[in-house]
Image (cartoon, rainbow, N blue to C red):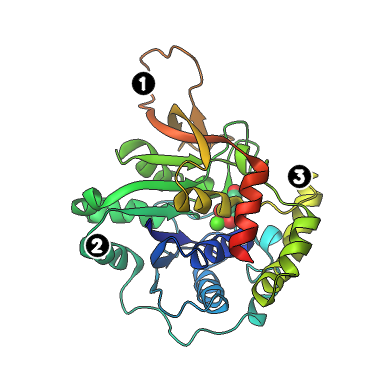
Amino acid sequence: MPRLIIDTDPGVDDAFALALAARSPEVDLLAVTTVFGNVGLAATTHNALRVLALCGREDVPVAVGAARPLVHPQPREATAAHGADGLSGRAATLPARGRGVEPVDAVTLMAQVLQASPEPVTLVPIGPLTNIALLLAAHPGVKPKIDRLVIMGGGLSGGNCTAAAEFNLWCDPEAARRVLVVEDLPTVLVPIDLTYRCAVDNHWLARLAATGPIGAALDSLTGVYRAHYRESMGFDGTVIHDAVAVAEAIRPGILATTRLPVAVETAFGPARGSVIADRRLTSFADESGARPIDVALDTDLDALRAFILSRLS
Ligand code: BDR
Ligand code: CA
């Protein structure tokens, strides 16, 4: 049974991703940790608690993580995509959770849970990588307890936040470089090149809404989000980026990966926060220090959508 820790900044697609893990009986959701990102840390934490409450998961500990990036300030939040409260203005309609946050911070909780786990754990970061960089820097001794990282982030063919950069990596490029390039843990990167192809249409959402109160509540969170993607990307569908990564964490191999050396741009300029993947068949020694990781570039799209729908229903 996969054992998961999800690090998240909810966020509409994070809400779908959390619900997917919370409602999948074949996984052990050991902890949820929160980070700044789509909106501020207080709101992302509030939203994570409420989504877990919606799913009836009082048992999952939640701890609060970083309020800002490691080095440079976050240039802007993603309120245009997710709404001022992170959930299309609907956060307050979700049930409150009786159990609040743990008395320890996110990094401490992750370290404690990893140390206590008899089996290796999959870390699933679906927001900026700040908490994960801090964990690996402060507690390198827990690395043998991490079987792999399944990270939603990056765009090999351009960005969604800037022309070059995807939002999660762009929020904290220094942390992203530490986790993706400097560290040596087995890593699956789930970039927007694939998550856009996995978008669900209005018919899929209508089917979800008809399954019951949880499906209806999730569907109700998508208003601002759908409008934003339609206007900014010309994309008529709901892009459940983070749920695609969580699906891979729940069912290893549901995404098809290609091993590619990757680097992260940390210099200031138009490419800051972008991921550079070397797709040449023969790569020559270079100075970028790129590290080979598994990049998820394909899946059976209909099977993936059916899997997510069945778990959320
Ligand atoms: C990522 O950025 C956030 O807005 C989403 O929640 C997702 O994690 C997609 O680029
Ligand atoms: Ca996210």
Between the C-alphas of marks 3 and 2, the distance is: 42 Å
Q: Which residue matches tag 2?
A: 117
Determine crowd level at label 3: few under 14, some 14-19, many 20+ residues with C-alpha closer than 10 A.
few
Cβ atoms under marks 3 and 1 closer than 8 Å: no
Q: Quadrant of residue 76?
A: bottom right
Cβ atoms under marks 1 and 2 closer than 8 Å: no
> SS of the residue at dot 2?
loop
Q: Quadrant of residue 125?
A: bottom left
> SS of the residue at dot 3?
helix
Q: Earlier in the sequence, mark 3 or mark 1?
A: 3
Q: Is mark 2 within 8 Å of ligand 2?
A: no
Q: In the figure, is residue 60 to the left or right of 89?
A: left
Residue occupying image coordinates x 75% and y 51%: 229
Q: Nearer the viewer, mark 3 or mark 1?
A: 3
Q: Which residue matches tag 1?
A: 287
Residue occupying image coordinates x 46% and y 53%: 250
Residue 39 pos. (x, y %): 58, 65
Residue occupying image coordinates x 49% and y 27%: 277
Task: Give the vertical position of 267 relative to 224 (above or below).
Answer: above
Task: Give the vertical position of 113 relative to 124 (above or below).
Answer: below
Amino acid under disc 2: Ser
Q: Which residue matches tag 3?
A: 233
Residue 92 pos. (x, y %): 64, 81
Q: Is residue 75 visible?
A: no
Amino acid under disc 3: Met
Q: Quadrant of the N terminus?
A: bottom left
Amino acid under disc 1: Glu
Q: Nearer the viewer, residue 156 or 301?
A: 301
Q: Earlier in the sequence, mark 3 or mark 2?
A: 2
Q: Quadrant of the C terminus?
A: bottom right
